[in-house]
Image: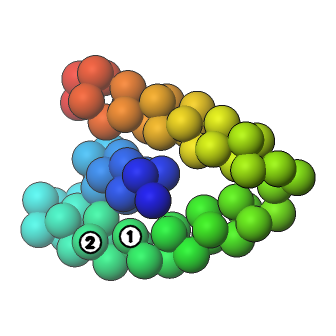
C-alpha cells in the first residue's frame, strides 16, 4: 500500500537521527504501517471511500516526501 511506504519515507526523512538510523527506522516501519493502513481500509464504509482516502493520504505524503526541502 503506497500510504505505508510513503509514510515510512516521510518518517525516515524528517527524523532527527543519523542517516543509518533513519534508514533502519523507515525500513522497519513499513510492515506495521501497512497493517495499520489495511485495518483502516477495511473499516471504510465503501471501496470508493477507502480508495479515496488512500489516494488523498498518498498525495499528501508524496508532497511531504519529495516536494518539501529538508
**Image quadrant in which the C terminus is located:** top left
**Which class describes the residues within 10 Å of circle 1: few (<14), some (14-19), or many (20+)?**
many
Q: Secondary structure at mark 2?
A: helix
**Which class describes the residues within 10 Å of circle 2: few (<14), some (14-19), or many (20+)?**
some
Q: Secondary structure at mark 1?
A: helix
Marks 2 and 1 sit apart, C-alpha to C-alpha, by 6 Å
Q: Which residue is mark 1?
A: 30
**Residue 21 placement: quadrant:** bottom left
Instruction: Tally the marks.
Output: 2
Residue drawn at x 31%, y 52% is 9
Residue drawn at x 23%, y 62% is 22
Residue drawn at x 46%, y 30% is 59
Q: Which residue is mark 2?
A: 27
Q: Position of residue 25 (x, y in %)?
A: 30, 70
Q: Nearer the viewer, residue 16 or 39?
A: 39
Q: Position of residue 30 (x, y in %)?
A: 38, 70
Q: Is residue 12 left or right of residue 37?
A: left
Amino acid at each position: 500500500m503506497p500510504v505505508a511506504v510513503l509514510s515510512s519515507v516521510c518518517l525516515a526523512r524528517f527524523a532527527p537521527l543519523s542517516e543509518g538510523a533513519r534508514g533502519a527506522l523507515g525500513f522497519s516501519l513499513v510492515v506495521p504501517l501497512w497493517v495499520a493502513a489495511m485495518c483502516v481500509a477495511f473499516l471504510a464504509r465503501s471501496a470508493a471511500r477507502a480508495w479515496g482516502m488512500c489516494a488523498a493520504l498518498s498525495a499528501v505524503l508524496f508532497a511531504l516526501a519529495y516536494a518539501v526541502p529538508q
